[in-house]
Image (cartoon, rainbow, N blue to C red):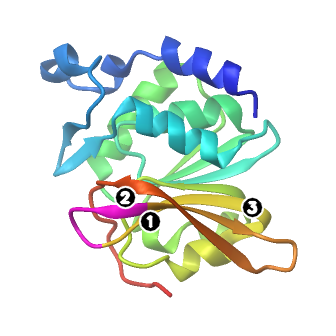
């Protein structure tokens, strides 16, 4: 991944565009903000770090769990071939689609549902980005990761989690590396290892 190109695009992307007007004055600050329905938009530095960990290539097919405001989706779509994004809250999905359509993206596919189960009919995925915390690593997501693929996912109880980089080798074995402590809203569903 071209990290300089990523940083340039990241800095050019107006976070306020992905927030309701009442939050615009807070958009430049490096902290999470509410987007409604008990959900948040992550702090920009964490969005950048998670994207760097994925090591995206323009040929990659990416699964995103938790469309949210569409902010992370826009960054993924800029650097991947196709993005399949799953959001359980219908209104958030529709608002994100409208924003992302407004930016001209044509390589994003939307699904409303429980992200714990991924998007099996579109698997396998070269990369998986999970933007909500799972109590355990979801089996469905691990199985939908292609050999040689990478997944970034927060795992842990409500309140404080570890951010993990999960890599699947060519033989299908998972290698898990703890990156840092984070705070995310919870992922719905309990289908873990």
Name the disc covering residue 178, or none: none
Label 1: element kind:
helix
Tell me: 28 left or right of 3: left
Name the disc covering residue 115, or none: 1
Q: Residue at x 49, y 76 (%)?
A: 137
- Which of pointers 3 and 1 indicates the residue nearer the eye? 3
x then y, percent, for residue 161 = 34, 64
Label 2: element kind:
loop
Determine contact: label 1, label 2, CB under 8 Å. Answer: yes
- Distance in Å between CA atoms under marks 3 and 1: 18 Å
Tell me: 150 left or right of 48: right
Q: Which residue corresponds to mark 2?
A: 132
The crowd level at tag 3 (other Cα within 10 Å; few <14, some 14-19, many 20+) is many
Q: Residue at x 75, y 27 (%)?
A: 2
Q: Which residues are magenta?
A: 157-162
x then y, percent, for residue 21 = 18, 18
x then y, percent, for residue 160 = 27, 62
The crowd level at tag 1 (other Cα within 10 Å; few <14, some 14-19, many 20+) is many
Is 159 covered by the magenta stretch?
yes
Q: Which residue corresponds to mark 3?
A: 149
Question: Where is 191 relative to 48, above or below?
Answer: below
Question: Where is 119 relative to 29, above or below?
Answer: below
């Amino acid at each position: 991944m071209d990290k300089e190109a990523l940083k340039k695009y990241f800095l050019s992307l107006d976070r306020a565009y992905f927030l309701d007007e009442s939050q615009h004055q807070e958009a430049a600050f490096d902290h999470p903000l509410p987007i409604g329905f008990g959900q948040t938009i992550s702090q920009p530095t964490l969005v950048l770090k998670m994207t760097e960990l994925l090591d995206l290539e323009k040929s990659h097919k990416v699964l995103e769990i938790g469309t949210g405001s569409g902010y992370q989706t826009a960054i993924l779509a800029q650097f991947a071939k196709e993005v399949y994004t799953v959001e359980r809250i219908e209104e958030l999905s529709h608002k994100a689609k409208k924003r992302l359509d407004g930016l001209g993206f044509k390589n994003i596919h939307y699904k409303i549902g429980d992200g714990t189960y991924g998007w099996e009919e579109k698997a396998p995925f070269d990369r998986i980005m999970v933007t909500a915390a799972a109590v355990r690593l979801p089996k469905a997501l691990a199985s939908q990761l292609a050999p040689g693929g990478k997944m970034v996912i927060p795992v842990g109880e409500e309140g404080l989690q570890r951010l993990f980089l999960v890599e699947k080798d060519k033989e299908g074995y998972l290698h898990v590396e703890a990156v840092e402590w984070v705070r995310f809203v919870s992922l719905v569903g309990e289908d873990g290892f």
